[in-house]
Image: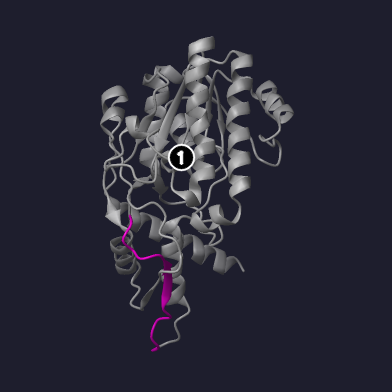
Amino acid sequence: MSFWNNKRVLVTGGAGFLGSFVVERLQDRGCGSIFVPRSRDYNLVEMEEVKKLYSDSRPDIVIHLAAKVGGIAANKKAPAKFFYDNLMMGVQMMEAGRQQGIEKFVAIGTICAYPKFTPIPFKEENLWNGYPEETNAPYGLAKKMLLVQSEAYRKQYGFNSIFLLPVNLYGPGDNFDPESSHVIPALIKKCIDAGNHKPKDMSYEPITVWGTGRPTREFLYVKDAAEGILLAAERYNKSEPVNIGAGVEISIRKLVELIAELTGFKGRIIWDKSKPDGQPRRMLDTTKAFREFGFKAKKDFRDGLKETIEWYISTNSEDHNRK
């Protein structure tokens, strides 16, 4: 806990889904100086605004979580934006941090950086063995450049930066916007909305899910992810990438069935096979994170889904009552 004493910490994206839990955990650890920039005040795609952020916050440690993110549909719609914004934010944040002489830079990558056909479980040494899955390759490669930069800056400048590869996150506070949400919040919203719109004594409206249901995914509870990031910040000081995950694989078909069960959805599920599946399989090897800084995910997946569903229902009810 003493690691954070008298440290000034800048958390980009600290008001977002993952960032809010990272900030909460920092506060729990006794960190009294946390700077959370807002996008309306600092456009991190512009170098002058990145420099202004450093001038305003004067951090010792930077945890760079800010990113332009979205599901397959969002990535397909705006691949150039996903590439450019993520690349420029990351590269400039690290470069300006080096110029400022900060103590440590924590860069957050993505599982989308892995090759499309990576052996299961994904090991960090497989990261350069092929091209990422096409629908999110621009995003994945933009984030992957932070690893290249981290290794180059450590070699040339002795700059202490680390690069973490979290798997897909979920949990209370997730993004449920159908235009940009990932698979778990999108499915929860579809199932609950179908039930809410069901006339009394009438059958449920069917829901449509992209793809075949065959691909597999791994999901990490957001509070576990926040803990993993802070453990790495405290204990890990190498530029080699480290996976942050739960080490559990589930097919999209079984995921849909589980969310339908937990939300009480009893309608028909239509699989739109004209839509892309995305990467065939995803599951991380998480042994390195445990070995290097003692991280192991704790939340049971079913319990985490229940909490996420309960949060969405309660938030939706509050929004409805306010209208």
Name the image quarter holding the N terminus: top left
* Quarter of the rendering containing residue 310: bottom left
Q: How many marks?
A: 1
* Residue 118 place in picture, x, y as percent: 33, 42
Q: Is residue 211 magenta?
A: yes
Amino acid beneath label 1: Phe
Q: Is residue 36 visible?
A: no
Q: Give the overall secondary structure of the magenta segment.
A: loop
Q: Secondary structure at mark 1?
A: helix
Name the residue that disc number 1 marks.
Answer: 21
137 part of magenta stretch? no
Q: Nearer the viewer, residue 228 or 313?
A: 228
Asked whether residue 149 appears in the rendered view, the answer is: yes
Left or right: 312, with 121 as reference point:
right
Which segment is the magenta one? 201-215
Looking at this view, name the residue that lies furthest to the bottom: 201
Q: Residue at horizontal 38%, vertical 20%?
A: 236
